[in-house]
Image: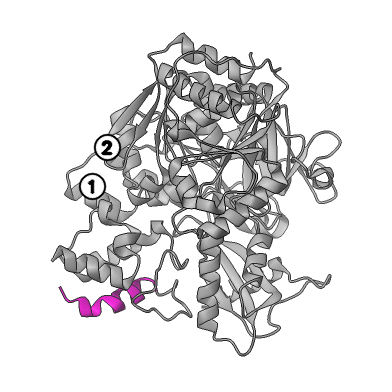
Amino acid sequence: MQPLGLHLLDQLRGAPERVVATYVALDGSARDLAARELVAHANAVALGLRRLGLAERALVAIVHRSGPWLHAAWIGALWAGYVPTMIAPPSPRMEPRKYAEGFSGMVGHLGIDAVMLDQATRTALGDLMPAGTPFLTTDALQPVAGAPNIPALGLGDEVAVQHTSGTTGLQKAVGFTSRQIHVHAAALLERLQATPSDVVVSWLPLYHDMGFIACFVTPLISGMRIVEMSPFDWVQRPALLFEAIDSQGGTLCWLPNFAFKVLSEQRLLAVAAEQGRTWRLAGMRAFISCSEPVMADAIAQFTDRLAPFGVRRQQVLASYAMAEAIFGVTQDAIGAPRVAHVSRQALERDGRAMRGAPGGEGLIELVSCGTALSTVSIEVRDAAGQVLDDGEVGHIHIAGPHVFTGYRRLAELNASVIDGRGYYATGDLGFVLDGELFVTGRLKDLIIIRGRNYYPQDIEALVGEVAGVVPGRVVAFGIPDAVIGTEQLIILMEIEESQTPGKIVLAVRRSIAQSLDCTAGDVRVVPPRALVKSTAGKISRAENRRRYLETAAAG
Amino acid sequence: MDLGKLHEVVAVALKRELTGIDLTDDLELVESGIIDSLALTTIVAALEAAYPGLRVPDSDATVDNLGSVDRIKAYLAGRG
C-alpha cells in the first residue's frame, strides 16, 4: 500500500499505453486516453499549480466539466502535494451571480485555497471569481511529458475531500486519507469480484461520491478502464449509456434509482425499435442502484423492458452508500440481489419486519441493499441508543476504518453524530434481516432528488428571501414519487395578502432553479397561518408533510 | 402542422408543473424551474402525440428548441 499520488504514478507509468479512460461524446464517438497521456496532462496541472505558490497541503477546488482535464486536475493536485476537492460547476440555467455567491461562500467556509477550472466555466463566471483566490485554468495548459516530483506523504495524510450535499450553502466536507481510500476500494472490489478487466461506464458527475469514488477513484487506482460521458449529454440522450456499454464492453455501472426509470421509458425503447437499434447488455456484471431510495418498481420496469437486450434481474444490485463512509457501506454480491416480502402492517405499526411468502396478502416487497462490506459494522439502535434485534426498525449507525471521523470545521456537529465508539448516526432508518440491510426511511429532513442531497433549511431560506413571501412561513420537504423514481420537492408558503400567488410561485421556482439547479415538484401558496408549528414554535416539516400527503391522498 | 393548438398541448402536458402559474408563450420553462431538462422528454412525447408523424430526434431535444412555447413554435416551423 502506497500513498495515493505515488500509487497512481507507479500504476500509470507501469503500463504507459494502457487505455485508462474513454470519453464518449454526444454523437457516440469515443476518444481513448492512454496512461502516458494522462500522466502528461496531470503533470502539467501539477506544474501549473505549483506556480501559484500555495501553502503545503492547500485545499484546491476543482470546478470542471467532464473530460480528460477533469481527471488530470484531480491527479495533478495530488502530485503537487495539495488536497483536491470536486465542486459542481454552474449548470446552464443557474444565474452566474447566484452561483458565484454560493461558491464564494464555500471558498470561505470550507477554507478553499485555490480553484482549478476549465475555460468554459471560467468564461461563465467572468468577473465573478472569488476575490483574492488564485486559480488555474486547466484546459489552457499543454500536456508536459515526464514524471512529477511528488512530495513525500504518509498513508495517514488526507488526500481527498468530498461533500455531502448538492447545495452550495451548507456544504459539509469530509476528508479521507490514502489508507482509507485503499481500504474502501479493496472491500468494494472484493464484494464485486472486480478485476482490472472490468470496464466502468458512467455519466455521473464527479462532485458526487457515487461518481467520484465508484466511477473514478476506485477504477483509477485498481486499473479498471473508465468509460465516461458528460451528465448533460446523458440527460439529453439517455440511450448513450447503453450504446457505450455495448460498444466499449462495459461490465459495471452505478445509477441512482430514477435513472432506471429514465433508461426504460417507453419512448426511448420505441425510438430504438423504430431505428432498428439494439444493445448488447448481457455482458454487464452489475447495474448498481445507489444514492437514493431503491424502489422495487423501478428495477422491475428496467429488467422487464430491457430483457430483449439481455438484461436479467440478477444483474441489478443495490448498495447503501454515503460520502461519510467514502462511499460504500453495504453492497449486494454479484448475481445475488435480494428482496424481502414483509407484512406492511407489522412494519408500519410495530416497526418490525415479518417475512411472509411472496404473493401473500398484506405484504410489501422491500429491496435489500446487501450486506455490510467486510470493513463496515452496522448497528440498528432505538431512540435511546439500545441496539435492536434483527428485523426491528431503528436508526442506522455505522463504523469502520473508512467511516469519517468528523466533518471539517464542524466540531460541534461532530460530537452529536459520532459516538465514543466511532459509530456515525446516519440519520437513516431501517432494519437488518439475515445480515441484509433494508433502508425504510429517514430521520433527518434531508431531501434526495435524482441522487443529489438538498437540505430543506437551504431551500426554505432561499424561498424566504423571495419578495412577497412571509419570512419564516415556508416549509420544504420531499415526498417519494414512484412514477419518476425519485423524490419530489414540495414547498408550502404563506405570502403577503397584497401579492398575486401565481407571480410568487413563479419567482420561487425561478429562484430555486437559478440558485440550486433544483426543480420543485409542487410549489403552493397556503392560507395565512395554515402552516403547522411544532410545540417548540418552529414550523414542523414532518407535520406539514403528513398533512400534505393526507390531502393528496384524499384527491 | 396546426401550431395554433401548441399552447394548449404544452399546458396540458405540464398541467401539474404549471399549477398556479399563467403559461405565457415566452415563459422559459427550464430556466424558470417549471421543469428540468430531463423533463423535456415529456414535451417531446406530448408533441409527438399531438402531431402524428412528427419525430423529434434526441439531438433536437434541447432547451434552445423546446424551452418555451415560442421556442417550440419556431422549432416546428423551421422543420416545415
Which mark sits nearer the N-terminus, 2 or 1?
1
In this view, which residue lies farthest toward the bottom? A498
Q: Which residues are magenta?
A: B1-14
Task: Report the residue at 22% width, 71% height from top.
Answer: B50
* Residue A36 in the figure: left or right of residue A414: left
Q: Nearer the viewer, residue A460 or A352?
A: A460
A551 part of magenta stretch = no
Instruction: Kindly identify the residue that appears in the image at 49 percent across and 28 percent down.
Output: A72
Question: The numbered mark 2 sits on a residue in which chain?
Answer: A
- Residue A479: quarter of image: bottom right
Q: Secondary structure at mark 1?
A: helix
Residue A248 drawn at (x, y percent): 32, 28
Q: Residue A214: horizontal and vertical position, in percent?
A: 53, 32
Query: Which residue does the numbered mark 1 point to in the structure image?
Result: A272
Please say whether residue A529 is visible from this viewpoint. yes
- Badge 1: chain ID: A
Q: Nearer the viewer, residue A426 or B9?
A: B9
User: SS of the residue at dot 2?
Assistant: loop
Kindly check if marks 2 and 1 are in contact, taking CB atoms under 8 A apart as contact: yes
What crowding class fits label 1: few (fewer than 14 Cα within 10 Å), some (14-19), or many (20 or more)? some
Residue A322 drawn above or below residue A365: above
Q: Position of residue A335 (x, y in %)?
A: 46, 30
Judged left or right of residue A137, residue A152 is: right
Instruction: Please give the count of numbered marks on the rendered protein.
Output: 2
Q: Which residue lies at the image location 59% right of the left edge and 19% below the top edge? A: A5
Provide the residue designation for mark 2.
A279
As shown in the figure, which amino acid type bears the numbered disc 2? Trp
Pointers 2 and 1 within a single chain: yes
Q: Position of residue A450 (x, y in %)?
A: 50, 52
